[in-house]
Image (cartoon, rainbow, N blue to C red):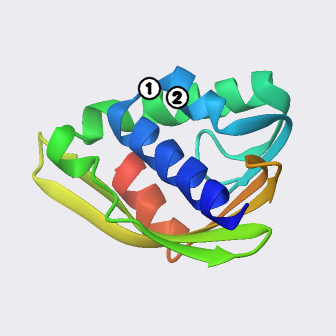
Amino acid sequence: MSQQNLENVRRLFEAVEERDIGGVLAAYAPEIVIRDAESLPYGGVHSGLEGAKQHVEGAAQTWNHLQPPAERKMDAVFLDAEDYVIVLWQLKGLAASSGKKLDSPVVSVYKMRDGKIVESQMFYADTVAIGQFLFS
């Protein structure tokens, strides 16, 4: 099951980079719970596939104009931890008007069941810097 878990999370990251909402939702179990930093516009706890859809749409709305295709690549490293998959990745952004860039490390933890993600938690290195990038 471990290889199946890794492949599902890899597909999730590819779908996020491609802005494929259907592909993102396909990685999740119906009972998915997503926990993201409250300070982000799409943050908080999101439950079920409808909550997951709201989360991914909110993230896309926040980041689409700040992530041209070159900035969407997350340089993810996937670590197998049996019933969990840990991913080390980079949150990137480019404010075209000012030229300001963001490149911040993130760790995500995915709890797996039957090859699907049932829990997702993101840990950002610096939510203050992300907020400054988004809101200034």
| Residue found at x 44% / y 36% | 15
Q: Judge the density around disc 1: few (<14), some (14-19), many (≥20) Cα neighbours within 10 Å.
A: some
Asked if labels 1 and 2 touch by Cβ distance under 8 angstroms, the answer is yes
Q: Does dot 2 land on a helix, a strand or a loop?
A: helix
Q: Position of residue 121 (x, y in %)?
A: 71, 60
In the rendered picture of this protein, how many numbered marks are placed on residues?
2
Quick check: 36 left or right of 47?
A: left
**Label 2 neighbour load within 10 Å: few <14, some 14-19, many 20+:** some
Q: Is residue 49 above or below residue 6?
A: above
- On screen, residue 60 versus residue 49, left or right, reads left
Q: Is the residue 96 above or below the residue 38 in the image?
A: above
Which mark identifies residue 70?
Answer: none
Q: Position of residue 16 (x, y in %)?
A: 44, 39
Q: Residue at x 62, y 75 (%)?
A: 80
Where is residue 33, by image quadrant?
A: top right
To which quarter of the image does residue 6 belong? bottom right
Camera-nearest residue between 95 and 35: 35
Instruction: Give the amino acid at mark 1.
Output: Asp
Q: Nearer the viewer, residue 112 or 132?
A: 112
Q: Quadrant of the N terminus?
A: bottom right
Q: CA distance from mark 2 to mark 1?
A: 5 Å
Residue nearest the observer in this picture, 99 or 60:
60
Instruction: Please tell me which residue is depicted at 74% across the width and 48% down the height of the picture.
Output: 117
Residue identifier under label 2:
23
Residue 126 in the figure: left or right of residue 14: right
Residue extending furthest toward the right: 31
Q: Residue at x 12, y 48 (%)?
A: 98
Residue, disc 1: 20
Name the residue type under label 2.
Gly
Q: Secondary structure at mark 1?
A: loop
Q: Percent position (x, y) of residue 38?
A: 71, 53
Is residue 43 positioned above or below 90 on the image?
above
